[in-house]
Image (tube, helix red, strand yellow):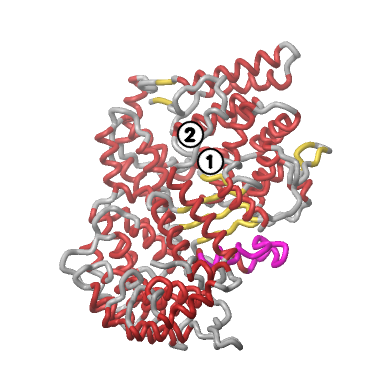
Amino acid sequence: MAIDLGAHLSAGESNRADRLALSRDLSEFLVDLSIALHQHSMYPTGHPSLQPAIEGVIRRAERLLRDRASIAIGVARRQLIVEGVSTDPAQPVLRRLAEGLHRHRIGAVSIVRGVEPYELSEVLKALSTEPDRDGPLGLRTAQLTRWSHVKIHALSFDGLALVGEGSPVGEGETSQSADLWIGLARAALSSDGSKESPEASAEPTAVAKAINENPGAEAYDQVIVGYLLQIARELNTATGQKAEELRRRTSRLIASLKPETLRRLVEMGGNPAQRGRFVRDAANGMAVEAVVEIVRAAGDASGQTISHGLVRMLSKLAMHAEQGSDTARPRASIELREQVSSLLQDWHLEDPNPEAYGRVLQHLATSHVEASPMSREVSQRPDPLRILQMGLESSASGPLTDRALDELVQTGRVGEALELLASRPDGTSEAGDAFLARLTSPEAIRAVLAREPIDVVGLDAMLPRLSPNGYKQLLAALASSENRTTRRRLLDRLASTTVDIGALVLEHLDDDRWYVQRNMLLLLERTGHVPEGFSPAHWTTHPDPRVRCEAFRIQLTMPDERAFAVAAALHDVEPRVIHLGLTAVQQECPADLVGRVLELTRAPDYDDATRLLALGALSRVRQQPVLLALLRLADGGRTLRGRWRLPPKTPALVVVIRALSRVWAHDPRAVAVLNAAAESSDAELRDAAAATA
């Protein structure tokens, strides 16, 4: 066994020179999100520039959500915090995004797997409004619950600006320590609906109470951990009054957290290396009593137990560092931090169990013991997780461990059991494999899926270890469940798998229920595992438009059926299906479909978005009927001198001018329109007139 909390770093290293950076995918996602929000604030609804921006953000999000359930973004005044890493406040694009969210009084944003373009578009539209004029989005409580896959965590109070007793920090004052504490307090209280005054809410005990009472939502925990990681790194090098006040407040916060809450937060802090960095920075910068609590939680999170003697020694050093004499305090503080550094650097224990104790463990794990009626009444039931641990330590299995595994499954503790197996000692592979096989058996999967609400933690832990037969059980549950939340959770997880489940999906496509057929088609499209020879043509005529929409998505990706799919989609009556067809012909519109696309540009039954897509599809077509249609749309009458006059500017007019400039720039009829646009006072119309191919 070994405690491995990350590679050793010397205590003297500067955390600023060793600043953690976001992954490239996360950075690009945040940049695209910021640009999309900026475009929504510049352009009106339906503008052709908005849809590509939304699609770009969705593609980035889907790539990130393949290996995580959600993306949680903490909001500070000038920077964002994602997965424990803060963005550079000097980066203008990301700083603009952070400041925009901050002005809307938003403490965190979480994007959940399965997010749809229309949801993101609505959120960005709401965020593009001026908070001074229309009110901050964080205060529009009813609006925050509209979106299923984009969660807005509002700030629950205003004006939190006290960092030290009697030392307010104004909005214009720059203080990293102040910003971090304000951000942590706001994030912690964002979901507890606190009605306390800002001064009271800023107190560490109030912040700790909010974190303790939070049910443990992953997005919430990620944001809280992100701030704690930033605070630990800041205190590693920061000096001065504000840093000292932040150190005291953080120490009181950690002391007020329940042990299980602190362990949960440390576990959320990332892999063992990042947990080690957190503990190391905490040991170098935080108050000593907080260091002891964090070390203990980090040991638990890594599946290790720090001996009681060592904990007592660290606690005693902490007491001397806080309450000892003037000579003892600095010496005790240095000794405690050196002990923690040594612990992190290298602590290995090959086998903690003496041989005799190991034999006892093996006997307990393999024996089938029938308790007497009296003993059953007076004794407590043993913890099945502890029995499983004993079986692992003795590398033995038997009836007792089998019963413990069954109980863990039935009580929704599969995730804990699999976590224990993931950190099993060396030399226990045979017993561990047997336990793992039982935990991922069809019976265990059915038991997990039968619970309401579904054991999401256990299911997520099982997924990487499932066989094709296990995925068959998940698909059966997806088809049979009457609970929409359960179906959504199963759908999200099945859609992100890399296992080829195409043949299993086809087994459920003959179900009579529309939502089963829709979900199965969606899985084929999202996973890309479409069995050879399969055609979705049968479902493109389904009476429910939601089923047709998913069938067309698949058919449009099939080269042999794409032409048929485009024509059928354009002649459908459902706007979502028509949008799919129009999107497919944006680069090249087949000549035989030009007439239908022309109809869509003037059909009164469809919205502006449909007309814009239709005009975009015609913008590269050189046919006389297209020219006549474009001229009609650009005709606003004549001036007193008989010159061409443009109608009032709309997104559609911009697309028309751009199409005339690219394709018909040398046609005399189009020249008059382009001249009028080139002389317009509107810069966008002038740019469109100059867009000659």
Q: Mark 1 points at which residue?
A: 84
Residue shown at 34% from the left, 25% from the top: 358
Q: Which of 67 and 561 is in front in this view?
A: 561
Which image quarter holds the C terminus? Answer: bottom left
Disc 1 + disc 2, Cβ < 8 Å: yes
Residue type at numbered disc 1: Gly
In this picture, residue 684 sits left or right of residue 468: right
Considering only vertical position in the picture, is 531 above or below 369? below
Residue, far front: 641
Q: Any magenta on residue 132?
A: yes
In this picture, residue 293 sits left or right of residue 431: right
User: Magenta span covers which residues?
Assistant: 121-142
* Main SS category, magenta section: helix
Q: Alpha-carbon neighbours of circle 1 within 10 Å: few (<14), some, or many (≥20)?
A: many
Residue type at numbered disc 2: Gln
Instruction: List x then y, in percent, for residue 508.
Output: 26, 70
Instruction: List x then y, in percent, for residue 52.
Output: 44, 64
Q: Can residue 94 be seen in this view?
A: yes
Residue, far left: 533
In this picture, residue 343 sits left or right of residue 429: right
Q: Name the residue under label 2.
A: 274
Q: Any magenta on residue 138?
A: yes
Instruction: List x then y, in percent, for residue 144.
Output: 60, 64
Q: Which of 126 and 193 is in front in this view?
A: 126
Considering only vertical position in the picture, is 526 above or below 594? above
Q: Earlier in the sequence, mark 1 or mark 2?
A: 1
Which image quarter holds the N terminus? Answer: top left
Residue, far right: 166
